[in-house]
Image: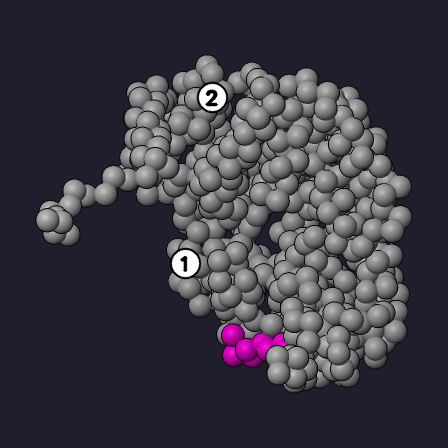
Amino acid sequence: MARSRRSRPPRRPSRAARHARARGAYERAAVRRAEDRIEIRLPVRRLSPETVVAHLGPTNSGKTHEALTFLAERGRGVYAGPLRMLAQEAHRRLAALLGDEQVGLVTGEERINEHAPILCCTVEMAPGAGDVLVLDEVQWADDEERGAAWTELLLAGEYRHIRLLGALDALPLVRRAFPDAELRVHERKLPLEFVGARQLRGLTPGTVVVAFSRKAVLALAGEVDRLRPGRVAVLYGAMPLASRREEIDRFLAGAAAVCVATDVLGHGVNLPCETLLFAETTKFDGERRRDLLPWELAQIAGRAGRFGLVERGHVGVLVGIAWASADPGLVEAALEPHVELPEGHRGYRIVDEARIGPRLGDLGVDDPRDLDAALAAWHRVATRQWAHESWLAVESLQPIRGRLAVVQRHLRERGRRLGLEETWQLVNAPIDPDGAELLGVLALAVAGDRAQRPLLQFLLDTARLRDASLEEAEEAGRVAAILRWFALQYPGVGGVTIERAAELERAAAERVVKRLTVEVRDGTIGRCRSCGRTCPPWFPLCERCARTARR
């Protein structure tokens, strides 16, 4: 007689499920063991600064000018900003004022006159001591992936004079780090005026149109080019820096009457912009499509009306593009700060936390194979220890752990090993997730695997860019930036030199500019491939043709 279903023994988990469960238990046990070796140390300043001044206010309010003037008068010190482009801009301004020999540039990808008395750096590259520190965009201390670099300088930077620059939103954070800092609140030199809706045909010279994806920008640029052939500039984040600079220079010189840009515009790009129009007020943030926050809109809108470049600033929305939709109410509301801040001020949000990240010496490991468990353990211990510190938060370790996983996978597959210091340096590389696989190749090159050299030589070959598409040229620019960083850390390894990496970056930038001209002039993005009518740039067909194709 067959057994009833109720009396059957439970089904045994599959071998893969048992293996995954055992591995998870092993990893949790490894993290618990690693916690005992963790040492949590806050950055500590041994010598207090003589002066600390916080220059806080909106864009176009003169705070950067005042701080850089102080740095130039002192003649020795550091400007530290969040982006390579901002460091380059500060370097140009100071070198024009003091002479090239007095000012250097140090970022992850380049070194120019690095022993000069004044250095312009990205924050991660800033020295820990000096005479003057100008720390830009201080609110970035709350960035969950990079904020620890700002916190390190706030807590331990040993400078005689510290100048903090940023939005008024960061006032609570400044008071936590320096309770007695002198506060200088800067007001905009030119007020912004909301001008409502504008049509594409009514765009005047000096107008910047903002959208929030590469395809949207290219589609809008194509629409503008139909009305003003050859007179539109384009800016978006995937462009190599040299390409961005060329497009900015075209707009500055008046060769381009209109600029179409993404929110890269909000990060230190100074344009003679009289009117700024939002074509969109939503963006994809990596997880979902959402409305822009007031502080995001305000940061971008503040680029209109640059003092000394134009006489007034107008902000509005672009209408008449079927697929683009901007909420004028959101934009108008964002022109007025509405959040109560300490000391009677108003802003757009409250920034009162700074992020802390691990240093290698905190992890208590000797073998790079133990790094991942140690990082997980550090995060747990730090979260518990700093839970009572209302203004310190733990930095996200997902990016560094992701890079570590890629590096270790490549090494394991090729039977190679790297030391602890080399592994730590590689996994802290300024590389986005889409460049992680290249980081694995570079790790193998450092480990002595000669099989990587032909691939790296191919990547450095500028001849392959002669017929490259726009996307291929953009990718080459990203690769060039990674290889520039690698050449500075490991000169000559894998045949990678700073000269060849810089040449690749230049060639990629030139190809991007050439392809942009073609893409914008042809105007195929944002046009139905079947009938040629306007359609959303993320679809190849308009709705009517797509319906016909489905029948």
Identify the secondary structure beneath mark 1.
Answer: loop
Residue beneath label 1, please? 341
Residue 285 vs residue 250: left or right? left
Q: Please, what is the three-letter code of the amino acid marked with disc 1?
A: Leu
In front: label 1 or label 2: 2
Work out whether 84 lies above or below 27. Answer: below
Farthest-out residue, front: 1
Q: Position of residue 211 (x, y in %)?
A: 65, 68
| Numbered badge on residue 369 | 2
Q: Position of residue 338 (x, y in %)?
A: 44, 68
Q: How many marks?
A: 2
Q: For the point 59% across and 19% down, which residue is it?
A: 416
Q: Earlier in the sequence, mark 1 or mark 2?
A: 1
Q: Nearer the viewer, residue 427 or 271?
A: 427
- For the rendered model, the colour scheme is one colour
Work out whether 324 lies above or below 139: below
- Which region is colored magenta? 322-330
Residue 405: horizontal and vertical position, in percent?
51, 32
Judge whether residue 76 can be spotted in this image: no
